[in-house]
Image: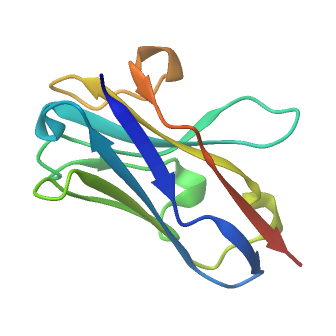
Amino acid sequence: QVQLVESGGGLVQAGDSLRLSCVVSGSTFSTYVMGWFRQAPGKERDVVAAISRGGGTTYYPDALKGRFTISRDNAKNTVYLQMNSLQPEDTAVYYCAARTSANIVLRTTLYNYWGQGTQVTVSS
């Protein structure tokens, strides 16, 4: 059984940074494309970053390029999301997700496994 457990969320002030972590257990982590998504109240769940199996390819929406960085450590079965210059509009529940795939995918429906989410709240 594949399990994803996120951590690192919290309450921060505008301009602060946070690093989220997601540990994957129960399967071979290096076979998964990994994604980070977020969902604010009343809004759809959207991708914020994705990374290929080996870590050599990443994706970010244009609006988040330069502020968010996704990385992974296959030896530790962990994917990270470094978030800098956080703003109140970044407030959301952040989820990591995994999919067995050769290529990065962005649609939430294409990911097979999800974590329980971690709350990020940014105050102004």
2 with respect to 37 (left or right):
left
Q: Residue 55 at what x, y percent from top left?
A: 17, 52
9 with respect to 11 (left or right):
left
Give the quadrant of residue 4: top left
* Display colour scheme: rainbow
Q: Residue 71 at what x, y percent from top left?
A: 29, 60
Residue at 69%, 69% in the rendered image: 10
Q: Is residue 33 above or below residue 20?
A: above
Q: In this view, does 122 lie above or below 24?
A: below
Q: Residue 76 at what x, y percent from top left?
A: 18, 58
77 with respect to 22 (left or right):
left
Q: Quadrant location of the C terminus?
A: bottom right
* Marker count (numbered): 0
Residue in front for this viewpoint, 7 or 87? 7
Q: Quadrant location of the N terminus?
A: top left
Residue at 57%, 38% in the rendered image: 116
Residue at 38%, 18% in the rendered image: 112
Residue in front for this viewpoint, 51 or 23? 23
Residue in front for this viewpoint, 74 or 91? 74
Q: Is residue 5 above or below residue 110?
A: below
Residue at 21%, 32% in the rendered image: 32
Which residue is the extreme one toward the top?
109
